[in-house]
Image (cartoon, rainbow, N blue to C red):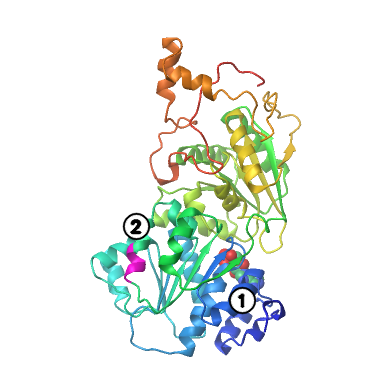
């Protein structure tokens, strides 16, 4: 049977109990990533899959894992399946997907994440649920304290591996992989397959893997309209957001900021405007985050202001508007953000608000994604920034001040300017303090933000 011929779940020869669960969820056709991955995974192959959240990738690893456990029952063993995710929210979401799919089985699952009492968690683990969905930090802690082992592990999944590595979990992930039973089946999911860290990790995790590339930026997101609106500064952006929320038709919206402080500031502003809104960032407690997500899922609120870390991988039904209050610092991050909308063939709209500091970053991301954002102006709320006077072939502003500023920093111009410039080095462009996970220093990778340089004169702006 070839990949193309599979168009209904029944043809995959799945266990009746799984088909019943799929039926109960109302799914009739596998999504493209499921069509590609399920036959290979069910045949026992290791896989590396390039797929975004929203593509249906969770079922692509949950179904083969459950089928394997149903085919080969092994009562009273330890952990048989482990799914590693970068964030607690994603772990909760994946855990729920496992519960839904295992609804007609006796297979048990639990999350192992930080933010919950360690001892209580260890006691739960001792009850031997077959499947653990875990974030690397807390799981590594359990291994260190020997409150669990993976001697019986048969199935390992790294979900959003690129993100996990970007968040600095490489050592924990390696420590975990090293104690997993070698004769297991493994699958790695990543939004991009050309991530250097992920590539380097693959030989450690997978054996003769099949590589499947789906819904990456080359193939996906056709159903998302992507626009930019030029902005003068944060106050101006605040007015643009107000306008957009008042004039766009949307069911649910998410607004991304690059820092926790700005997320809080903007959320307060929206609350003053009596918008049904909430905020989600990495410094909130697990209970607070759960509460806000619950409100959003239930539709009690319909606008969420979020930082990247907190909103990673979240699947929110009905999300059709993404506003990037701050431009994402990297192309992949941008992809993850806009991937929140336009899911499962729904139309989505993603709007980036771009001030003069963000132009080059935006142009770099356009090049990386090989697309051109639609330029949009909002009548009545336009600012004075109209973009760079001249752009280079790369789309970036012509007349980069890089050299000039470097000279200044090297002490070749007036001392007053030099001193101020020195103070700017390493500072965030929004003046936030950079504390906390959600406010990581801008990195200088692909499409990333260079250090803020002072502009000698306002130029075209
Ligand atoms: P994921 O990319 O795994 O986060 O899935 C995104 C959304 O698609 C989730 O809400 C799933 O419940 C849903 N989904 C997964 N598989 C299917 C399918 N075959 N048909 C319709 N929806 C699906």
Magenta run includes residue 176: yes
Query: Looking at the picture, how far across and down is residue 146, in whole percent?
Result: 24, 70
Quadrant of the rendering where the N terminus is positioned: bottom right
Q: Which residue is mark 1?
A: 25
Magenta run includes residue 407: no
Q: For the residue with label 1, is its CB less than 8 Å from the closest atom of ligand 1?
A: yes
Q: Residue furthest left?
A: 145
Of 441 and 284, the residue lying toward us: 441
The circle on residue 461 is none
Quadrant of the rendering where the C terminus is positioned: top right
Sort mark 1 into few (<14), some (14-19) or many (20+) by Cα contacts within 10 Å.
few
Q: Residue at x 43, y 15 (%)?
A: 418
Specify start and end residues of the magenta stretch as a single range.
175-179
Of 55 and 402, the residue lying toward us: 402
Name which quarter of the figure residue 248 lies in. Answer: top right
Q: Residue at x 63, y 73 (%)?
A: 36
Q: Which residue is mark 2?
A: 171
Of label 2 and label 1, which has the lower sequence position?
A: 1
Sort mark 2 into few (<14), some (14-19) or many (20+) by Cα contacts within 10 Å.
few
Ligand 1, seen in the image, is in the quarter at bottom right
- Dominant SS in magenta: helix
Of 421 and 104, the residue lying toward us: 421
Instruction: Decide if residue 70 is in sight here.
Output: yes
Query: Looking at the picture, how far across and down is residue 302, in whole percent?
Result: 61, 52
Q: Say if 181 sits above or below 352 in the image.
A: below
Instruction: Decide if residue 291 is in sight here.
Output: no
Q: Residue at x 58, y 50 (%)?
A: 337
Q: CA distance from mark 2 to mark 1?
A: 37 Å
Please give left or right for residue 112 compared with residue 336 in the image: left
Q: Residue at x 46, y 11 (%)?
A: 413
Q: Say if 230 sits above or below 120 in the image.
A: above
């Amino acid at each position: 049977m070839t990949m193309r011929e599979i168009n209904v779940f029944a043809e995959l020869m799945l266990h009746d109990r799984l088909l019943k669960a799929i039926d109960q969820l109302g799914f009739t056709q596998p999504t493209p990533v499921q069509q590609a991955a399920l036959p290979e995974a069910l045949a026992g192959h290791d896989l590396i899959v390039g797929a975004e959240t929203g593509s249906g990738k969770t079922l692509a690893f949950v179904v083969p894992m459950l089928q394997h456990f149903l085919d080969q029952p092994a009562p009273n063993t330890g952990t048989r399946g482990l799914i590693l995710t970068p964030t607690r929210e994603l772990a909760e979401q994946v855990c729920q997907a496992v519960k839904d799919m295992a609804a007609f089985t006796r297979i048990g699952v639990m999350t192992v994440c930080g933010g919950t009492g360690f001892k209580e968690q260890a006691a739960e683990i001792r009850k031997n649920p077959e499947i653990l969905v875990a974030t690397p930090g807390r799981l590594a802690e359990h291994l260190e304290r020997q409150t669990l082992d993976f001697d019986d592990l048969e199935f390992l999944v790294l979900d959003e591996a690129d993100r996990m590595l970007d968040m600095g979990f490489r050592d924990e992930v390696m420590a975990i992989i090293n104690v997993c039973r070698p004769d297991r089946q493994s699958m790695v999911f990543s939004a991009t397959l050309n991530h250097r860290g992920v590539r380097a990790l693959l030989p450690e995790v997978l054996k003769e893997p099949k590589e499947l590339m789906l819904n990456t930026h080359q193939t996906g997101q056709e159903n998302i309209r992507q626009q930019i609106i030029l902005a003068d500064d944060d106050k101006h952006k605040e007015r643009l957001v107000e306008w957009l929320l008042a004039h766009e038709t949307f069911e649910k919206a998410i607004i991304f900021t690059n820092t926790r402080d700005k997320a809080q500031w903007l959320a307060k502003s929206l609350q003053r405007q009596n918008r049904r809104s909430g905020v989600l960032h990495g410094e909130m407690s697990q209970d607070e985050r759960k509460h806000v997500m619950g409100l959003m899922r239930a539709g009690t609120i319909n606008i969420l202001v979020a930082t990247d870390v907190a909103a990673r991988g979240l699947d929110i039904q009905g999300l059709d508007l993404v506003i990037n209050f701050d431009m994402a610092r990297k192309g992949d991050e941008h992809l993850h953000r806009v991937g929140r909308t336009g899911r499962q063939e729904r139309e989505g709209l993603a709007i980036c608000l771009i001030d003069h500091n963000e132009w080059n970053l935006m142009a770099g991301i356009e090049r990386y994604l090989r697309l051109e954002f639609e330029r949009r102006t909002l009548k009545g709320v336009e600012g004075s920034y109209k973009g760079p006077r001249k752009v280079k072939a790369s789309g970036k502003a012509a007349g980069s001040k890089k050299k000039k500023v470097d000279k200044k920093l090297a002490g070749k111009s007036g001392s007053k300017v030099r001193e101020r410039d020195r103070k700017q080095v390493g500072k965030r462009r929004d003046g936030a303090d950079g504390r906390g996970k959600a406010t990581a220093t801008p990195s200088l990778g692909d499409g990333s933000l260079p250090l803020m340089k002072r502009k000698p004169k306002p130029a075209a702006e």
